[in-house]
Amino acid sequence: MNDIVISTFAGAIRAGTPLLFATLGEILAERSGVLNLGLEGMMLMGAFTGFSISYITGNLWLAVLAAILVGGLMASLHAFMSITLRINQVVSGLALVFLGQGLSGFWGNAYVGMQANSFQNLKIPLLGDIPYIGPIVFNRDILVYIGYISVPVIWWFLYKTTAGMNLRAVGEAPDAADARGINVILTRYLYTIIGGFFSGLAGAYISLAYTPMWVQNMTAGRGWIAVALVIFAIWDPVIALIGAYAFGGISVLQFSFQILQVPIPVNIMNMFPYIFTVFVMLFASSNRIKKLFGAPSALGVPYSREEKT
Amino acid sequence: MKSKFLFVLLLVGIFTLSLAAPLKIAFIFVGPINDNGWTQAHYDGGVLAIQKAFGNQVQIKYIENVPEGSQSLSVLRALASQGYKLIYATSFGYMDQVIQAAKEFPNTIFEMCSGYATSTNLGEYFGAMEEARYLSGLIAGSMTKTNKIGYVAAYPTPEVVRGIDAFTLGVRSVNPYATVQVVWTYTWYDPPTEKEAALSLINAGCDVLAQHQDSPATIQAAEEKGVYAIGYDSPNMGQFGPHSYLTAPIWNWAAFYVPNVKSVLDGTWKPTFYYGNMADGLVELAPMSNLVPPQVQKLVNAMENEIKSGNFDPFEGPIYDQSGKLMIPAGQRATLDQLLSIQWFVQGVIGSIKK
């Protein structure tokens, strides 16, 4: 039984880590007012880039760096289309998904069935020996640790620094932010691209640590789950952590339940996260509650000095 | 006089042209041709094998990643109207659209894999993967120490259920104490989810894993945790588990495609329901890795010969379902109809088929 408890929680963190990265990145982008639905495409490009660079060079850190940069490159395309050209953000984001699927599939052909260096577990001394907590939390690969650290860093940045306040201002009231001398366009570009960095990292985690291989469409819809998670987390990095691991936990628990013959249908289990998301969206639809929850008011609205809305 | 000469020349020209004109063949695939799985098996055994066997007598086109369902109809129509005379649809989800296209283009021959509808210009083809599944079950049953074997399965379709049953019959014939634990992933293809399913089985004590999934994630999980694994679809999966991979039940579609194309070229094609087996060479067990002990390899080879000669059939009674009810009486074999619609597990399977 102990084994099952440990493996379920450990599995929750494993399955939750790619969701966490993608969600954190999207929180930053959406906080600046840019909705990027292209997470799936950026993750796929990150997964492909990470794997291929690891295969070619054997250098894992170079691989992760390349994946991050490619994620950012994809996001800058979205930034250009949605911020500068002011194209509908939903359309531009969807385009990014198909672009990522197509390009990674096409370029990835040569790497299917290959093997490359991958991240191994790295036990943290002392902490890794704590019963239960040790094997679950402190005997993981390094990308998981980066996930842990990212959350408080982003929280601190968002709520405790001037730059974070400026970011939130741009997403809440771009007019006011502009009047205060914050460069709205630049800010939005910056955080959309940083969002892409995180999606690229999420993809690299899948192809270099989770299931070290490359196959087409290997993210299998996790980018979309992250889009839902941002709402679930009401744009907060700490809730994102809880949400990502909980979503991950459900995807692991469904199998333990089947084995233990718990009479809850798998389909119902897989539905839970989305039910929560719909629930949050229902509540967040009223403006007053939206404020309370912290949904960026200017989310999805292109900014232009000439056309004040 | 001159015009008559020209006319004859024209006739001769048309005649030689029609002799030389290759048969235009098209394939529609549900995935990419290098997926190391289902689609690659059809590409290797179809496109490549036909090209090799018939050279410039044929002209082959294939389209990858054609979604199942309504979108495939426009692809089928386009191919038929471009003059493709023989069209292979290689996934179950194309069936309704293939039936429709076969009606619209009566002069085009359609062949549909894993469906069940036939008409004057529509044939069906599939194969007895259960025979190779049974053999892989012999290996799993012989090699388990915990008597717990895991099976990562996609969807409870008759094809998958049939495979689990045949596998379990193989397991139990050499090890009546072993059980086969099934978990459903509800996806054909999602490496992380497949891996989680495999890990959950390993945590529950399974020391041999089998799979009906299209990615090598199960083998990867087995390799990480030091248990054995049996692949599917492609012998290439073995490279993901040098210390875990035992074998894989695989398809050799060339055994169907090459004679089928020949029958079209000869003008002897008929719409049939083709169900190939190991004797036909359509279904194979990939070479066993050297983790499989010699005496087990010997047993498997002997049973393979029995199956090929027709002396033995995995679904030969008496066969009981999970509740102990007699489903196939002693001395009888399951009919093809029974196998194609099977929705019950044999004794020894742990898991349920949701209705």
Image (cartoon, helix red, strand yellow):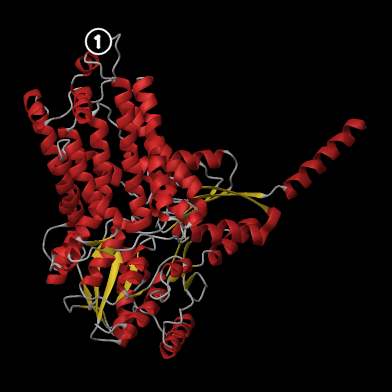
The image shows residue A294, relative to residue B133, as above or below, that is above
User: What x and y, as percent, mark residue A74?
Assistant: 40, 35
Which amino acid is tagged 1?
A: Lys
Q: Say which quadrant the N terminus of chain B sits in.
A: top right
Q: Say which quadrant the C terminus of chain B sits in.
A: bottom left
Q: Which type of secondary structure does the marked residue at label 1 adopt? A: loop
- Compared across the picture, whether B19 is left or right of B327 comes to right
Identity of the residue drawn at 17% across and 47% down: A241
- Compared across the picture, whether A277 is left or right of B85 comes to left
The image shows residue B295, relative to residue A147, as above or below, that is below
User: What x and y, as percent, mark residue B106?
Assistant: 53, 45
Which chain is indicated by disc 1? Answer: A
User: What x and y, as percent, mark residue A284?
Assistant: 11, 30
Q: Between B98 and A209, which is closer to the camera in this rendering? A: A209
The image shows residue A255, relative to residue B315, as above or below, that is above
Seen as rendered, the residue at the extreme right is B1
- Compared across the picture, whether B233 is left or right of A274 comes to right
- Quarter location, residue B136: bottom left
Seen as rendered, the residue at the extreme bottom is B295
Q: Between B115 and A234, which is closer to the camera in this rendering? A: A234
What residue would you read off at disc 1? Answer: A308
The reply to whether residue B121 is visible in this rendering is no
